[in-house]
């Protein structure tokens, strides 16, 4: 039994810390965008997003860390540098192949790649990259923007016809959810950011102001979710849209108290794809009982 438990933990570590889980999250979030706008799926885009996510997260993890106290994730990363390097290279090559077939969207994708590198640039110990360290002050904002652009804007570029106001509203809805999650991640990494000299809202503002920002983002998420009924009156869509915000609200206290890598890399990251999961479950029940 002990061996089985150890094997399960080992597999879970590869899925979570090896960036496979977060790549699946990205695909499901992109899938949900196609669903919301009632469009056919683009599997080439899914392939690009999956491998690009693997590559970018492996790149970020592979870069050296200056943490004084190693967490579960950092300890795992340090023991699996070769795995991360292989994932980085394989992901980069495979995503480039998919990118060839998405070349009509190359400008947007190239912009996203640049901003992804900027997010990791404070960890790059190379003189020419010190300029980019100033971007660390806005890392929470542009990380949330990158995720929203990848999982909302990229899919929308593949959809031939949709209401632009609906697209903007959905973009904002997704952004408020992701931004809230990113702030919670920043709270977890607050001490680490202070070590690196990186300023963010959690290192500048006090606890009460940060809490107010979190609550404001969740309220705006609920408002945009309810407003989306104007463009899509499907009960399943609106319910699946709202559920992640409800779950996130009830997990706020726990998320501010713990520093568990498993909690953040599984539970909180998983919240972002809850709409897709709920929709697929609801669709499955609908098919079964019809």
Image: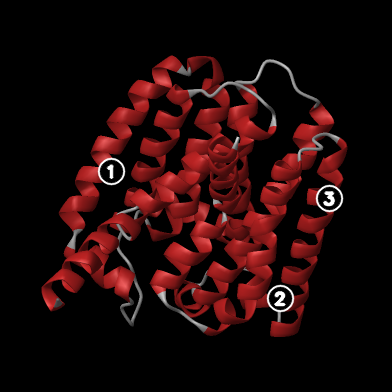
Q: Residues within 10 Å of mark 1 (few under 14, many from 20)?
A: many
- Name the residue: 52% across, 29% down: 109
Q: CA distance from mark 3 to mark 2?
A: 25 Å
Drawn side of residue 192 relative to residue 70, left or right: right
Q: Mark number for residue 226? A: 3
Residue drawn 25% across and 38% down? Answer: 89
Sequence-first disc among 3 and 1: 1
**Residue 279 seen by the camera:** yes
**Residue 199 rendering spot, x and y as whole percentages:** 59, 69
User: Mark 3 and mark 1: span between their CA atoms?
Assistant: 40 Å
Residue that lies at the very extreme toward the left in this rendered image: 3
Q: Quadrant of the N terminus?
A: bottom left
* First reached walking from the N terminus: tag 3 or tag 2: 2
Residue identified by numbered label 1: 88
* Residue 143: percent from left, percent from top: 57, 52
The residue under label 2 is 210
**Residue shown at the point (70%, 42%) measured from the top left:** 237
Please indicate whether residue 98 sits to the left or right of residue 27 in the image: left
Q: Nearer the viewer, mark 3 or mark 2?
A: 3
**Above or below for 43 versus 185:** above
Q: Circle 2 — which element?
A: helix
Q: Residues within 10 Å of mark 3 (few under 14, many from 20)?
A: some
- Mark 1 vs mark 2, CA separation in Å: 34 Å
Q: Nearer the viewer, residue 162 or 146?
A: 162
């Amino acid at each position: 039994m002990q061996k089985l438990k150890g094997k399960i933990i080992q597999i879970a570590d590869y899925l979570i810390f090896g960036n496979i889980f977060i790549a699946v999250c990205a695909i499901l979030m992109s899938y949900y965008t196609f669903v919301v706008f009632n469009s056919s799926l683009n599997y080439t885009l899914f392939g690009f997003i999956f491998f690009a996510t693997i590559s970018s997260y492996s790149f970020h993890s592979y870069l050296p860390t200056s943490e004084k106290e190693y967490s579960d994730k950092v300890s795992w990363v340090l023991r699996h540098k070769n795995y991360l390097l292989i994932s980085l290279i394989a992901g980069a090559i495979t995503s480039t192949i998919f990118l060839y077939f998405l070349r009509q969207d190359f400008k947007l994708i190239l912009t996203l790649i640049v901003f992804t590198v900027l997010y990791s640039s404070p960890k790059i110990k190379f003189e020419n990259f010190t300029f980019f360290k100033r971007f660390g002050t806005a890392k929470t904002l542009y990380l949330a923007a990158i995720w929203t652009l990848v999982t909302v804007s990229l899919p929308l570029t593949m959809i031939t016809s949709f209401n632009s106001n609906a697209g903007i509203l959905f973009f904002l809805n997704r952004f408020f959810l992701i931004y809230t999650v990113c702030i919670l991640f920043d709270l977890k990494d607050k001490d680490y950011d202070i070590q690196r000299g990186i300023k963010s809202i959690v290192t500048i503002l006090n606890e009460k102001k940060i809490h107010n920002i979190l609550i404001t983002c969740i309220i705006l998420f609920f408002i945009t979710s309810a407003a989306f009924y104007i463009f899509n009156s499907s009960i399943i869509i609106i319910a699946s849209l709202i559920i992640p915000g409800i779950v996130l609200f009830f997990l706020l206290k726990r998320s501010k108290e713990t520093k568990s890598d498993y909690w953040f890399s599984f539970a909180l990251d998983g919240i972002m794809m809850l709409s897709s999961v709920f929709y697929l479950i609801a669709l499955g029940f609908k098919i079964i009982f019809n």
